Amino acid sequence: MHRAPFVQNPRHSTAVRTLLVGAAFAFSAASTFAQSTPAGLAAVPASQATPAPASPAPYGYSDDDFPAAKNSRKPSVAVSEGALPSPAASAAFDARAGAGSASNLSAIQFWNENDIFWSDRYYTNGLKLAYTTPEISTGKELPLFFRDLLKFSPLSENTDIVPAAYRLHFALAQEIYTPWREHTALPQPGDHPYSGLLYATVALSSETLSRLDSIELSVGILGPGSYARQAQGEWHRLIGVKLAEGWRHQLRDEPILQLGWTRAGRYTWLRKDSLQVDWHPRAHVEVGTIRDYASVGAQWRVGWAPAGLPRDFGIAGIRSSPAFTRPAGGFPDSAWLFVDLQGEGWLWNSTLDGNLWHKSAKVHRYPWVAEAVVGISAQWGDLRVSLSEVIRSKEFRGQHGEVSVHHILSLGLTF
């Protein structure tokens, strides 16, 4: 039977209402933890506020060394040793250390997610290329469209010790999905549908001392127009692997229009000599034609970093906001291990639920999914390399195996 449009389907109407409630809850919870006193900062009465004590750079600064940071500090907050530096202090430190400020740098990052080490099934391959602009110190320097967007967005501005700095981010991505049994031309009812996604994303991010906010807009196509069949076929020919035979049953062409919002925090737990431990909590909400879901998670990093780990918000995957692409320049060489845990609540996923406006293959999707990531990352000058393994819980009824596993290779270049 032909499927009714999204807005006319009672099940979808209920899902939309539920999603709005969930989105409001996620936004409220994220705002609460992000608006609290940043890690390493202690709120004290203005009469008792004292300048920051001198500490080894780059995570402990004195106001005498960095007057720009001193002038921008709120009088009701005192900074304790171990607090993260402000962008103004970062620029001063970079200049004194003979390195360029990361705020003046742009970045390109490439991702490849693939299950080649395990088997060619389900989420079988993903590619993404992202570009991040240099820092824009004030919203007035943004193009008119983005300035208007700021008026209605949840981006942070002047909410921390220093004013927010903005960046624009652009990305192009492709995702490929196949069933468990690829080497048959027959339909596979009850198994993951063949599908491909091809989409472009533009994001506007706002960064303060300990917080990142990002709004993302993605447009693209689901179905044969994504060229997923051709991409997988050419790769299989190159490596000498048998071609999948069931692509004729893939989901039909439909447009992709997604709107997302991300908030992430940045907090240092420990820094002793060259050892540093930090963590990055985050929340994400996304709605659109192919995905309606919300997620919460956190990443923990421990590493060798003589001058501190890079001041970013963790290593992210293809589906994450391109705002996580940060310049690697301006910091000495470092290496670290990371663990990432995330929980997701899903209301709609076209790669499992099928086409939105056409009759198509589909499966019984689970509403809750857990994900764990373990990886290693290193930085040499302007190059950053990350390798990680992703483990996801079952996403639909009848899925083979208790979990699905794929690896992520990420390369970042700052210039």
Image: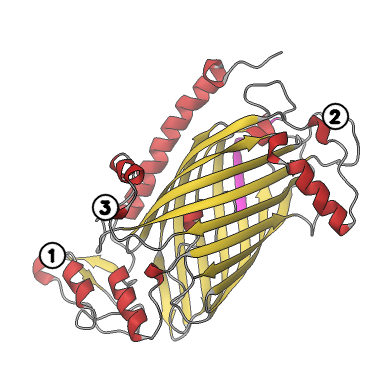
Residue at the spot of label 2: 187
Q: Residue 182 at x, y = what percent?
A: 86, 41
Residue drawn at (26%, 52%) of the image? 140
Residue position marked by numbered label 3 in the rendering? 140
What kind of residue is marked 2?
Pro
On the rendered structure, is 191 left or right of 9?
Answer: right
Contact check, label 1 and label 3, Cβ < 8 Å = no
Q: Position of residue 128 (x, y in %)?
A: 62, 54
Q: Earlier in the sequence, mark 2 or mark 1?
A: 1
User: What sort of colour scheme is used for the picture?
Assistant: secondary structure
- Can you say whether 265 is above or below 332 in the image? above
In this rendering, the label closer to the viewer, 1 or 3: 3
Badge 1 crowding class, 10 Å Cα cut-off, few under 14, some 14 to 19, many 20 or more, is: few
Asked whether 184 or 405 is in front, the reply is: 184
Q: Which residues are magenta?
A: 364-371
Q: Which residue is mark 1?
A: 45
